[in-house]
Amino acid sequence: MPDDVDHVVDMEAVAYAPAELTVSQGDTVAWRHAAGEPHSVTAYQDSIPAEASYWVSGGFGSEEEARTGWENGEGVVQSGQSYVHTFETTGTHEHVCIPHEAAGMVGKVVVE
């Protein structure tokens, strides 16, 4: 994991811990695989600020591409890996772990 991370979210078996995080504009967050099967960190395209760039493990351009990519084994965060994103746009950013969405593995980052 990079040294310049401001916050860490652990990806547990079927949950992000913490599920909700408040950060400052410009802060960097790392989602660290802590337990369970492979995970994803996928922004809900309609639940991030309109002016924000889309963000997702795997670097896809949209939520639809990320979901298709996951089906093809792309955008995966495995044991020992992390996904890192720096938040430049204030507002609420909601995200999901695609394979664990039905289990309620969703999160929120509030950027102030």
Image (cartoon, rainbow, N blue to C red):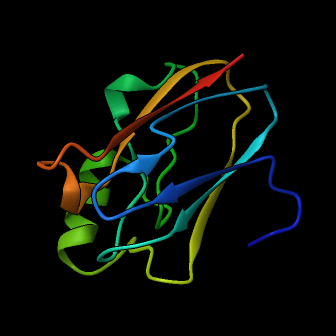
Query: Residue 10 at what x, y percent from top left?
Result: 53, 58
Q: Is residue 71 above or below residue 18?
A: below
Instruction: Please tell me which residue is depicted at 46% across the width and 26% down the height of the picture.
Output: 48
Instruction: Please tell me which residue is depicted at 68% across the width and 25% down the height of the picture.
Output: 89
Q: Give the position of the N terminus as an image quadrant.
A: bottom right
Q: Residue furthest left?
A: 102
Query: Residue 35 at what x, y percent from top left?
Result: 40, 73
Toward the viewer: 81 or 52?
81
Question: Which of the 4 image quadrants contains residue 37?
Answer: bottom left
Query: Residue 81 at what x, y percent from top left?
Result: 56, 78
Question: Which of the 4 image quadrants contains residue 47?
Answer: top left
Instruction: Please tell me which residue is depicted at 49% across the width and 70% down the height of the picture.
Output: 34
Q: Is residue 49 above or below residue 15?
A: above
Q: Give the position of the C terminus as an image quadrant.
A: top right
Instruction: Please tell me which residue is depicted at 29% across the width and 57% down the height of the picture.
Output: 65
Number of marks present in the image shown: 0
Q: In the shown orientation, is residue 51 left or right of residue 34?
A: right
Query: Residue 41 at what x, y percent from top left?
Result: 43, 55
Question: Which of the 4 image quadrants contains residue 31?
Answer: bottom right
Q: Is residue 39 above or below residue 47?
A: below
